[in-house]
Image (cartoon, rainbow, N blue to C red):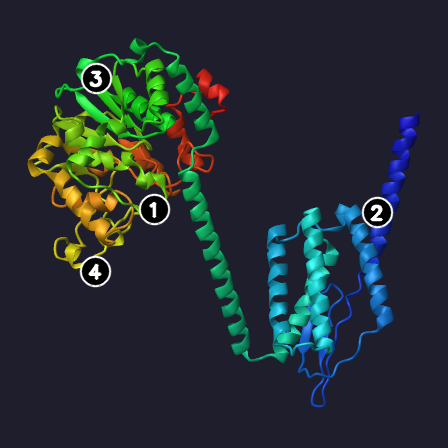
Amino acid sequence: MGSSILITKKRRWKAQTLNLIEQEDGEGLKEPLLVVYNDNTSNSDVRYSSDGDKISVESKFSENATRYNTKEDTQRRQQENLLETKEVSHVDTVPHNMPRTLDEKLKEMKDQVIWAEAYLSFSPANSSSHFVKELKLRIKDVQEAMSQSTKYSRVSRRALQKMKAMESTLLKASRMYPDCTAVVKYFLAMHYNVEEQVMAHQTQETFLQELGGRTVPRHLHCLSMRLTAKYYALEPEEREFPNKHKRQDPNLYHFAVFSDNILSCSVVVNSTVSTAREPERIVFHVVTDSANFPSMSMWFLSNPPGKATVHVERADSFRSLSGKHSVTTKEDSVDPRYTSELNHLLFYLPDIFPHLNKIILLDHDVVVREDLTELWSKKMRGRVNGAVLTCDEGEPSFRRMDMFINFTDPVIADRFDANVCTWAFGMNLFDLQQWRRRNLTQVYHKHLQLGNDRPLWKTGTLAIGWITFYGHTITLNKKWHLLGLGYDSGVRQEDIEKAAVIHYDGNLKPWLAFGLEKYKLFWSKHVNYEHPFLQSCGIHE
């Protein structure tokens, strides 16, 4: 009984509400008072039909204007506030078939405010003319309409009328300032300021991405600490890797990766082994720094890659090699990705692996999608380095030598051609026998010493790599190495499907929170997220 009475009361209230709304619609809403300007030569008149559409505009304005009626203005503002409250309460007062979306209307309001502020800037400083007051009032009205529309996710009828009033005022302004020169100058200055702000934000974004790219995430640090503790709990004999005899066997397929990132190394190894036709002939050489050697070793001791062989080595065990060539590396960058000894150890491959004839070097941010052992049958034609080229101007991976190397220096200009095709690090096939014959490690040290004396190239190993292997590189088919998944969101799916190796070069690495989400699946499928250490350190898919 009580519920039926309550329903009846609600119906009566709705009926009364609808009746009030119909009365308001029948009476129509009064337009805000418009300022009408007159002069001695012509009349000014802006007339609207009952439905708010403009009928005619005939005007030539001067600085003489009728004053606002203070009492009428106060009453109008009170009516607007009351009506705004009613419209918020009754959503049905706004037509559902409104031709434009909320976003479009908000953009239109913003444009109106920008134009009004532009015209306002043309007025003399501290001006109190009626037109200036009208502009300020219209700006305030439209800004309030924007605020209300954003708050309630809808554009009220009152807001639409405020936009029409602003349109009328802007029309007056265009008649008062017929010269477009001032308007153009204003918007050019505004455009310049916006460009400056965008450039500043882009610079800040790049810096933060680079900072994030070289910072060890908390969960990876946690994983390293847990593995290190477990490693030192092992007996000395338990720390030895199996299949030692395979490490120097030149008849097997040898891969090298230099990294201090446990998770990324595991993905490189797992993806390579999972795609190999003969995984038992795969030998991985993982070289890491002394701080991460215990954790890296523990990971692969407890997570062996099937039938393949893995051996972890310390980078500091090869420090005698740099002493052998009597040179030190000087880098101005504070980025450890460039200053780390791991990055320059690749130029010592023939000395690190004296018994091997060929080896494939993989970066730690790649995923292998196809068997790479086919590359061992590649005819090198006396060349040392097999790599994918990066000299197609239409590609995001495009690089020119003079983008990284200082060709204004005669030492560079006399020995190298800036137009020679560049190539990429990340998936490279090296003929170590040819490397030894041509003594390219000494070539590397020679130019490195020159670069220490004066600025010849940008920080990193790419430029010095181009110089070291200049004239000693053979082209590999593009399918062997697809670049860009760490910076280019436009890499095509069909190119990814065809690629043997996909490379997350750039700052947006797949193990970072801000990595490109659309490409993370190809990487994460090779991570065992059920591993207890990954679970306890909060590493999830």
| Up/down of 44 relative to 193, above or below | below
Disc 2 marks which amino acid?
Leu
Q: Secondary structure at mark 1?
A: loop
Q: Is residue 111 visible?
A: yes
Q: Secondary structure at mark 4?
A: loop
| Up/down of 506 relative to 234, above or below | below
Quadrant location, the N terminus? top right
The picture places residue 140, in percent across and down from the top left corner, at 71, 63
Closer-to-camera residue (132/109):
132
Q: Which residue is mark 4?
A: 408
The picture places residue 510, in percent across and down from the top left corner, at 40, 33
* Marks 3 and 1, the one that precedes in the sequence: 3
Q: CA distance from mark 3 to mark 1?
A: 42 Å
Q: Which residue is mark 3?
A: 278
Q: Which residue is mark 2?
A: 18
The answer to whether mark 4 and mark 3 are in CB contact below 8 A is no
Q: How busy is the neighbourhood of tag 2: few (under 14 within 10 Å), some, or many (20 plus)?
A: some
1 vs 4, front mark? 1
Q: Which quadrant of the figure has residue 339?
A: top left
